[in-house]
Image (spheres, coloured by chain):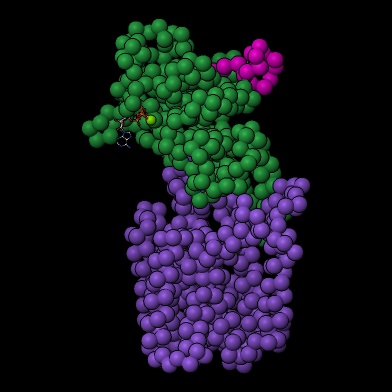
């Protein structure tokens, strides 16, 4: 592992010609993961690596186990077999909030926003783990609490500008159209300044224009902050365009793992998925 | 002056993060403060102060307490009466064990004790939700009342089981509890307490703790996945909520009625506070005041209005009428407007903001 992988901002060799952070060493590794629910095998002996600063896509037909894989990564599901290594350390059995605190954020296939709260409050909640002011300071909005609220508000406003949702920042998210809700959810995940961002079908149900916007946001996040991105997506055009590597799942098994071109040329993938009339 | 946001541009996020960003709202709050602190005490009769103003303030504290737990954190509770009883008896024990302790600290201390009790009964909330949690909090209600009834230590071995508030003063000689206290002094003392408690509640709900509560309420799984610890967050809601209910109970025993027995805090009180929160507006501090005002004023209006209109309605009919009106309103609000009177108030303001243009 080169030193630039560990410390991406040191030295000019940390960036590629087009300004992206150079893909580094393995930041997260899943090894021989098997997960079943009662009799249903959702994942069978899955292994792959996620490298620092890359965009990794997980593809596969419905029910292939893609969402389950993300749920294993952020500690929401506990696989019966296999190990997860995060930054070289084997992960103990844990609660999902610990993954968030360790720098792993995610969005959901079915939007999971806090419906009664405004877009701004949803995004602010993404920063809750970074806020430290105590009970009395909050109750009387004293120095520390006030400063903290204002500072975090400024950060969240940057995200709001970036995602172009200024006009709806005070609207309860339940009243927003689907596409904007997806953006707010991305904003809430970004607010935590995660190292790894897990996106479960961020573009599902969007029209072409909305998809293009979302692709742009994802690539910009990766480029500007070097955030490692693992995303699930059905649209093959999108996947081939934006990802550095692709993992293909089918019926809970891994079919292939490689660059978009390698995966596209893989005979198993062509048989099972691409050529299978999907 | 028109009610307008226009022209009041916020030049900083700090300014936008004030409790009342709109100037007219700030003026309104100022007017209410002047009215409540300066004008009402001059004109309110003893009857009005002791049957309307003081119970209104006491119930407002309880409603804020339950609203934090149920309206903000989404944890349904029917234990409010039990927690209020805890506050009343804690205040009694504190003030008789430590006769020199300032009454302000007696109230705060009873709130803290109730907070601990609330946390204990909040532990099941990690595993159970909604209806089942409500049943678990009912256990708190019945257990606590049973405890205060059965263990004579809580009443200092009084044979009747009734506790009487000892006379206590602030600023040296202004009596605020006990039979010799003037009703205006009681009212003003309570008012300042309520003002500060409401301010603290409003601030908590707009800071990170409040957002954690609402996140748990709206979608607990997503909240946990973005790093919010479910157990701590729920227990903090139980603690803060019980702190308010405890102070409400202490104020009930010490300022409103002056003497109290456990029975005063029966399950009926728990339901009444819940109704206040639903009618006033779940998840709104202002709504807690609306709900309390409604609950206190309705019986007074129902008792006096027929008389003024020359009708002669029997007393038991009036109390039945009270329940029918509450029942109808609760069904209305639950179905049509879960955010209660507070939401209607907000809609009114939004209309006013746009008035006279329909868009
Ligand atoms: N919590 C659960 N309980 C029971 N079965 C589950 C659970 N989660 C997933 N499964 C099962 O595991 C399998 C994989 O589901 P998963 O949601 O991971 O697929 P997916 O690849 O995300 O599919 P889709 O493209 O439809 O989102 C399915 O058969 C599903 O029914
Ligand atoms: Mg899925």
Residue at 49%, 19% (x, y): give it: A238
Q: Which of the 4 quarters of the picture holds residue B193? A: bottom right
Q: Position of residue B48 (x, y in %)?
A: 59, 87
Left or right: A1, with B191 as reference point:
left
In this rendered view, identify the residue nearer to me: A207 or A231. Answer: A207
Q: Is residue B349 above or below residue A270?
A: below
In this rendered view, identify the residue nearer to me: A44 or B220. Answer: B220
Say if the magenta span includes residue A9: yes
> Ligand 1 sits in which quadrant?
top left
Left or right: B278, with B205 as reference point:
left
Q: Which chain is purple?
A: B
Q: Which quadrant of the rendered structure holds the N terminus of chain A?
A: top right
Q: Position of residue B357 (x, y in %)?
A: 65, 55
Q: Which of the 4 quarters of the picture holds residue B316? A: bottom left
Residue at 63%, 82% (x, y): give it: B187
**Magenta part mainly helix, strand or loop?**
loop
Residue A239, visible in the rendered structure: yes
Total residue callouts: 0
Residue at 62%, 34% (x, y): give it: A164
- Report the magenta residues as a range: A7-27
Q: Position of residue A182 (x, y in %)?
A: 51, 35
Residue B117, visible in the rendered structure: no
Colour given to chain A in the rendered image: green
Q: Is residue A19 above or below residue B262?
A: above
Say if the magenta span includes residue A104: no
């Amino acid at each position: 592992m080169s030193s630039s992988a560990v410390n991406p901002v040191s030295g000019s060799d940390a960036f590629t010609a087009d300004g992206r952070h150079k893909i580094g060493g393995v930041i997260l590794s899943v090894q021989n993961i098997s997960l079943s629910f009662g009799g249903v095998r959702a994942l069978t002996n899955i292994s792959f690596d996620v490298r620092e600063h890359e965009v990794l896509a997980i593809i596969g037909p419905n029910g292939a186990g893609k969402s389950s894989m993300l749920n294993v990564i952020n500690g929401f599901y506990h696989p019966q077999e296999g190990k997860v290594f995060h930054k070289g350390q084997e992960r103990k059995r844990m609660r999902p909030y610990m993954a968030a605190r360790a720098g792993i954020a995610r969005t959901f296939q079915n939007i999971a926003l806090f419906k009664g709260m405004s877009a701004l409050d949803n995004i602010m909640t993404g920063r809750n783990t970074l806020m430290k002011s105590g009970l009395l300071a909050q109750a009387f909005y004293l120095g520390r609490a006030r400063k903290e609220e204002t500072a975090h508000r400024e950060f969240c406003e940057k995200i709001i500008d970036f995602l172009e949702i200024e006009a709806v920042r005070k609207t309860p998210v339940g009243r927003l159209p689907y596409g904007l809700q997806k953006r707010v959810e991305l904003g809430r995940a970004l607010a935590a300044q995660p190292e790894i961002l897990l996106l479960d079908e961020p573009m599902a149900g969007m029209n072409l224009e909305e998809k293009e916007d979302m692709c742009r946001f994802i690539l910009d996040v990766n480029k500007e902050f070097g955030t490692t991105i693992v995303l699930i997506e059905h649209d093959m055009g999108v996947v081939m365009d934006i990802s550095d590597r692709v993992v293909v799942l089918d019926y809970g098994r891994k079919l292939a793992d490689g660059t978009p071109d390698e995966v596209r040329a893989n005979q198993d993938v062509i048989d099972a998925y691409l050529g299978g009339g999907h | 002056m028109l009610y307008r946001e226009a022209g009041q541009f916020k030049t900083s996020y700090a300014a936008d993060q004030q409790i009342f960003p709109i100037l007219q709202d700030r003026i309104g709050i100022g007017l209410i403060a002047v009215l409540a602190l300066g004008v009402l005490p001059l004109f309110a009769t003893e009857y009005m102060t002791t049957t309307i103003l003081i119970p209104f303030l006491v119930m407002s504290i309880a409603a804020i307490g339950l609203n934090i737990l149920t309206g903000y954190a989404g944890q349904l509770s029917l234990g409010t009466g039990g927690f209020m009883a805890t506050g009343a008896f804690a205040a009694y024990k504190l003030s008789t064990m430590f006769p020199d302790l300032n009454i302000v600290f007696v109230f705060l201390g009873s709130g803290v004790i109730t907070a601990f009790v609330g946390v204990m009964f909040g532990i099941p909330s990690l595993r159970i939700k909604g209806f089942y949690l409500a049943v678990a909090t009912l256990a708190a209600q019945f257990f606590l009342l049973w405890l205060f009834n059965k263990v004579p230590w809580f009443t200092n071995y009084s044979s009747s089981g009734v506790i009487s508030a000892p006379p206590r003063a602030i600023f040296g000689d202004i009596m605020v509890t006990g039979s010799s206290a003037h009703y205006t002094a009681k009212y003003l003392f309570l008012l300042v307490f309520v003002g500060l408690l409401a301010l603290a509640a409003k601030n908590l709900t707009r800071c990170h703790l409040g957002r954690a509560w609402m996140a748990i309420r709206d979608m607990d799984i997503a909240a946990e996945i973005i790093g919010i610890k479910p157990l701590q967050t729920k227990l903090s809601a139980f603690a803060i909520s019980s702190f308010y209910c405890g102070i409400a109970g202490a104020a009930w025993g010490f300022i409103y009625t002056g003497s109290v027995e456990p029975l005063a805090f029966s399950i009926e009180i728990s339901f009444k506070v819940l109704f206040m929160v639903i009618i006033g507006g779940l998840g709104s501090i202002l709504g807690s005041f609306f709900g309390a005002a409604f609950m206190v004023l309705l019986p007074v209006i129902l008792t006096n209005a027929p008389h003024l209109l020359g009708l002669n309605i029997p007393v038991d009919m009036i109390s039945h009428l009270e329940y029918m009106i509450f029942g109808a309103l609760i069904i209305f609000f639950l179905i049509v407007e879960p955010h209660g009177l507070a939401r209607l108030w907000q809609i009114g303001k939004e209309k006013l903001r746009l008035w006279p243009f329909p868009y």
